[in-house]
Amino acid sequence: MSTLIDTLDAAGAKATFFVTGTLYGCIHNRADYIKKAVKSGHQIGSHTWSHPDLTTLTEDQITTEMSKLEGAFATILDGKKPTYMRVPYLSVNDNVTNVMKKMGYRIVLCDVDSQDWNGLTPEQSMDRYNAAGASGNGHIPLMHETVKTTPSELAPLVIAWAKENGLEMVTVAECLGDNRPYVKNSAERTDTC
């Protein structure tokens, strides 16, 4: 995450990082990177505690997934929680939508999936951006900083593509004109996974 933050910062680009609690190790072990992202003007969003397909869970199970993550964010983000979340696997149904709404979240999907998670090379991912084009109101892309080539190869290619096409890379909240990407977090602070 740190390498990607540095790459984005050097280009004057902003991003939204959707963070899980345990998928890539304990979130508390990544707290410094999360704080660095926020300090640099990037946005942090929720991505569930353990990355399950929420459409297969009950309301209580979905609430637990998000509540555990809120506890970690209460500690890391000094009593704040994100108001945006991305559902794992981009999988959503009415139950998921209703629970997220009750919990004060706005669901973010993407319109360009780089498929970096699925083994596409950076060049193959760029084919997906080129196919999407640069017209209209821009894009909400899906990329993963945990894929080895994404921070070092794909991100610079996307940044260059955006600049060449007159697109500004901003956070989801900024794109939507929202000045409240975080709210007060009443969850009990947690320091463990």
Image (spheres, rainbow, N blue to C red):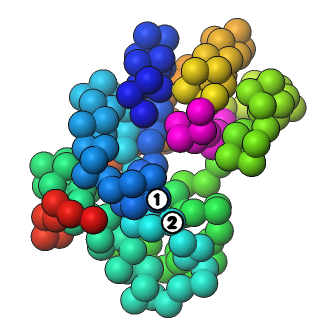
Q: Secondary structure at mark 2?
A: loop
155 relative position to 49: left or right: right
Q: Residue 173 at what x, y percent from top left? A: 42, 41
The quadrant holding residue 38 is top left
Classify mark 2: residues with Cα within 10 Å, few (<14), some (14-19) or many (20+).
Answer: some
Report the magenta residues as a range: 139-148
The quadrant holding residue 125 is top right
Residue where numbered disc 2 is placed: 51
72 up-or-down from 124: above or below = below
Q: Residue 64 at what x, y percent from top left? A: 35, 80
**Amino acid residing under circle 2:** His
Residue 22 among magenta residues: no
Q: Earlier in the sequence, mark 1 or mark 2?
A: 1
Q: Where the N terminus falls, by quadrant?
A: top left
Q: Residue 39 at what x, y percent from top left? A: 24, 28
Kindly report which numbered mark, 1 or 2, lies closer to the viewer in this rendering.
1
Q: Where the C terminus falls, by quadrant?
A: bottom left
Is residue 114 visible to the viewer in this orientation of the structure? yes
132 up-or-down from 169: above or below = below
The quadrant holding residue 131 is top right
73 relative position to 127: left or right: left
Q: Which mark is residue 23?
A: 1
